[in-house]
């Protein structure tokens, strides 16, 4: 694990999964490694009422019903589609569910405009085909086909980014639960084993890029993951993910609660401004997601670690926020400057303290980028 830049969930939480498997007495669908109740506990964390002799920390922060509906869907014959805005934790939830169900979250296809049908079915090892002809040995199964053969979960990221012919190929896999290999005469069908399913994710902001057909929609259960609006929940998410990132970088630096409050309040203010905007030119290009908050905080912490005095300060946080969110010039810079002048400046005059430093840091970064 120390040699991995980012360990998959089944490796990172192997000890927890081993423990839960050892105490799990609940019914398990198919060849699942954990029962549905234990999977929910692994994702959402344990409580005293669960009666475990060790604590299982919460890993995904969201409504309990979303996790339960996702688990129930995967226990059926339908695929699971997690849909929501960027940064709502769709991919992380998909990874956790795959890790808990089958201890393998790495059978992933990334949907892009360049994704082809071969990426979800199979391709060929050209040198082996030339030497020995087409056979099962010279075939390269896709992650989805491998999941079918093993009876485990396959994942498809950003489904709506892939073209219609790729989406159509998924319809037969989800319906028939097998893939035909017409190039072979014998052993030319791969049947899905019990336990196979697909977790797909889709960005709600990609609507209109490659809309899903009605036929494909019928083969998925939709679970819509909303943007986190509760300040306390969002603080927990930002703190949890930031601590993980800092451990990965071997950085020991505390995030003062006052600065975390400033970050959360700033994003809340900017979201409110985006909601009331009358045109796209008055909105930041950024989605202002929780994931982007985490990126802003991580950037500020690493800057303080490497180029500061290893103390996170409000000015550094403001510089990181402006630098991360100002993607268009001059539009985004103008929006952020207006925010500093109309919202942060009055707040700094009223509350003083860290808000003054935050205001100065933001203005300096805008001046440098202008």
Image: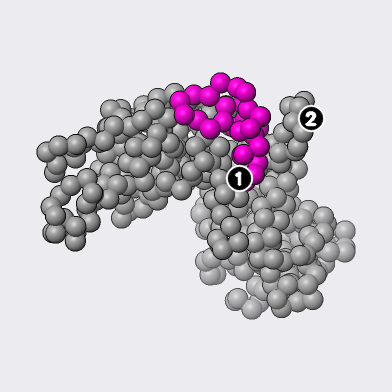
Q: Residue furthest top?
A: 27
How many numbered tags mark residues here?
A: 2
- Which color scheme did the rendering employ for the protein? one colour
Residue 189 in the image: above or below residue 162: above
Q: What residue lies at 69% left-to-right and 66% top-to-bottom?
A: 250
Residue 35 part of the magenta-drawn span: yes
Look at the image and tell me in which quarter the C terminus lies: bottom right
Q: Quickly name the residue at label 2.
A: 48
Q: Quickly name the residue at label 1.
A: 14
Per the image, label 2 sits on a secondary structure element best described as helix
**Dot 1 alpha-carbon crowd within 10 angstroms: few under 14, some 14 to 19, many 20 or more:** some
Q: Give me the C-alpha separation between circle 2 and circle 1.
A: 22 Å
Q: Nearer the viewer, mark 2 or mark 1?
A: 1
Q: What residue lies at 69% left-to-right and 36% top-to-bottom?
A: 45
Per the image, label 1 sits on a secondary structure element best described as helix
Tell me, yes or no, whether the two marked residues, 2 and 1, touch with CB atoms within 8 Å.
Answer: no
Nearest to the observer: residue 300 or residue 275:
300
The percent position of residue 50, horizontal first and vertical second, equals: 73, 27
Q: What residue lies at 47% left-to-right and 29% top-to-bottom?
A: 31
Look at the image and tell me in which quarter the N terminus lies: bottom right
**Dot 2 alpha-carbon crowd within 10 angstroms: few under 14, some 14 to 19, many 20 or more:** few
Nearest to the observer: residue 105 or residue 365:
105
Nearest to the observer: residue 267 or residue 81:
81
Residue 290 appears in the picture as rendered = yes
Magenta residue span: 13-41
């Amino acid at each position: 694990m120390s040699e991995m830049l980012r360990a998959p969930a089944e490796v990172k939480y192997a000890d927890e999964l081993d423990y839960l498997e050892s105490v799990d007495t609940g019914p398990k669908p198919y060849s699942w490694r954990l029962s549905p109740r234990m999977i929910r506990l692994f994702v959402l964390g344990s409580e005293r009422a669960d009666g475990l002799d060790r604590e299982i920390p919460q890993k995904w922060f969201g409504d309990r019903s979303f996790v339960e509906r996702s688990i129930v869907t995967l226990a059926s014959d339908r695929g699971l589609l997690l849909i929501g805005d960027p940064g709502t934790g769709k991919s992380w939830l998909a990874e956790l569910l795959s890790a808990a169900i089958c201890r393998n979250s790495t059978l992933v296809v990334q949907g892009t405009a360049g994704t082809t049908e071969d990426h979800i079915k199979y391709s060929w090892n050209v040198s082996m085909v030339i030497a020995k002809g087409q056979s099962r040995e010279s075939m390269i199964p896709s992650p989805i086909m491998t999941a079918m053969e093993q009876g485990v979960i396959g994942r498809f990221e950003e489904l709506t980014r892939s073209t219609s012919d790729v989406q159509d190929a998924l319809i037969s896999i989800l319906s028939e639960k097998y893939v035909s290999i017409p190039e072979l005469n014998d052993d030319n069908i791969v049947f899905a084993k019990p336990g196979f399913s697909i977790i797909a994710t889709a960005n709600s902001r990609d609507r209109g890029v490659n809309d899903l057909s009605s036929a494909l929609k019928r083969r998925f259960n939709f679970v819509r993951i909303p943007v986190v609006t509760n300040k306390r929940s969002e603080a927990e998410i930002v703190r949890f993910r930031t601590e993980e990132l800092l451990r990965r970088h071997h950085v020991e630096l505390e995030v003062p609660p006052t600065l975390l409050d400033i970050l959360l309040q700033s994003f809340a203010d900017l979201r409110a401004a985006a909601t009331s905007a009358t045109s796209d030119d008055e909105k930041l290009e950024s989605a202002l997601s929780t994931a982007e908050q985490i990126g802003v905080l991580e950037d500020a912490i690493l800057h303080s670690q490497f180029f500061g005095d290893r103390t996170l300060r409000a000015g550094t946080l403001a510089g990181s926020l402006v630098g991360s969110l100002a993607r268009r010039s001059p539009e985004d810079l103008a929006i952020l400057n207006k925010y500093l002048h109309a919202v942060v400046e009055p707040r700094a005059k009223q509350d003083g303290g860290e808000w003054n430093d935050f205001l100065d840091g933001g203005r300096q970064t805008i001046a440098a980028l202008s």
